[in-house]
Amino acid sequence: MILKFQTTFLALLVGTLLGGSVSAATVQNYWEQEEKPVAMPVSVSTDTLPDIGITAGSTLSIGQEIQMGNFYVRQMRAATPLIDDPLLVGYINQLGEKLVSHAYSVKTPFHFYLVNNNELNAFAFFGGNVVIHSGIFRYSDNEDQLASVMAHEISHVTQRHLARAMEDQKNNAPFTWVGALGSIILATASPQAGMAALTTTLAGGQQSMISFTQANEQEADRIGIQVLERAGFDPQSMPDFLQKLADESRGSTAPPEMLLTHPLPDSRLADIRNRAGQMARPQQRPISKDFLLAKVRVMTMYAGNDTEDARALIQQLQVGGSHEKIAAQYGEAILAYQDKQYDKASALLLVLNSQAPDNAWFLDALTDVDIARQQAGQAVARLEKSGAVINNPVLQLNLANACLEAGQYAKAHKILNKYTFTWPDDPNGWSLLEKASAAEGERDQELAARAEGLALKGKLDDAVTLLKQASASGKGSKLDQARYDARIDQLRGLAKIFEIYTKN
């Protein structure tokens, strides 16, 4: 469904953060049912390194990390080109969750984001938030290599590298680091503005910590490769990907951005290659179909107007195995759709759909094609026929969107009320609910849905203004008005909590 950094210290801080989804909100959304805390995995660690991440607790508690992550996730949504594609977000979060389930010392929820940036990079920050550049897909040959990057980032979080850096620099005010992190996130969207902000934040601060960064990188490698092995991925994929980084830097006047934020001395590559050589490799298996579909989707839909690399990838896949050929056909269909060759796109996708009727990648693309051909009713019928829609949030969004396009507003509204209750941190749900409410003339609900979208971007004052208008509109029931008023109080409370970050 289509719903439309570079000083030495920067290298340290982003490297310290390496590793995207939404951190746990410190104030509960009033549409969200209160749930018991989810128990984190508890295991006796067999990692070869001690769990020294806990030493950071005297400077920054886990609760503070989650709170800071919540704040900066909202800033990131407002300032960076996040890819909110439900299929891709779902894929990287499922992959990330698989890795996290095999990590030790997990003390926060984990959430994974994808940024539309062709530069080869990734980073992680407070509260278990891991951000992957879309360029990582271009350079990853298989899911194991992508997983190796994510396992590395996850290990930066579980070892609390950023909090430990703050502990190590007790003479620096902790919120100098907070400001620096905000500047880095800003730099993702606007490098010039971000670096200017970073320079201001760090005026007079210490910037000679590159050796500490290298220690962080090696530790994240050592912990990450064990997470990778326990999760069933090939440990050799980590040195293989690092070797690709090294090779990329040799013939270029400027090294890959990832090497600016993740130092790669020869000793680091040799160490991780030696460790991988001592680990058991899984039995050879076909390349992940979901990985191939995700890679093709990224390269066909999020690479700008230049489709040369995408077409080269499709040609390469056409001579591969069965999974590769399926991904090639999917890529051809997307390119045909983008070229408005809807009949061709439909024919290609219907063949794929006939082979896998409940596959979300194919159903999603068919829905877009049907809507483009003004056959939204056909998309609704197909999705409702699929049993997968009941438990698949991607298909639920597709069905709601198709219902909207088909003029079935009440049905769309019902689906989206349930969806936003279950997935309150997904901006796609609120955007569609705003449209559905407007189509039905429910002005108060339209304003409330728009307010939630703004709140997810950290625009809390604007969200409160809209909720006041919703409450005062007289359109909703007394229960609706009470909910709006309660949500106003929640957002005001959240804004007060966030004051400490906005003032520094």
Image (spheres, helix red, strand yellow):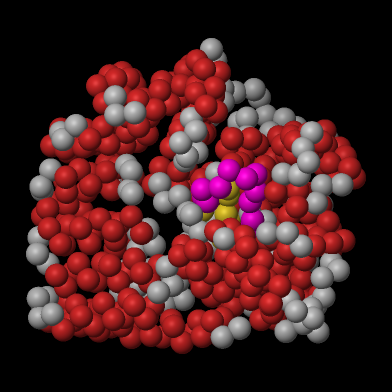
What is the quadrant of residue 355 in the picture? top left
Residue located at (64% from left, 72% from top): 197
Up-down relation of residue 170 to residue 450 (above or below): below
Screen quadrant of the C terminus: bottom right
* Residue found at the far right of this picture: 267
In the orientation shown, which residue stands out farthest toward the top? 319
Count of numbered tags: 0
Q: Position of residue 273 (x, y in %)?
A: 83, 37
- Percent across and percent down for residue 178 are 64, 76
Which residue is at 55% across, 44% downward? 134
Q: In this view, does 292 lie above or below 474?
A: above
- Quadrant location of the N terminus in the rendered image: top left
* Of 501 and 478, the residue lying toward us: 501
User: Is residue 350 on the magenta stretch?
Assistant: no
Residue 171 x %, y %: 81, 84
Q: Give the range drawn in magenta.
A: 114-127
Image-based side of 354 in relation to 137, left or right: left
Q: Locate residue 104: give its quadrant.
A: bottom right
Residue shown at 13%/37% (left/top)? 377
Q: Is residue 125 magenta?
A: yes
In the image, 377: left or right of 232?
left
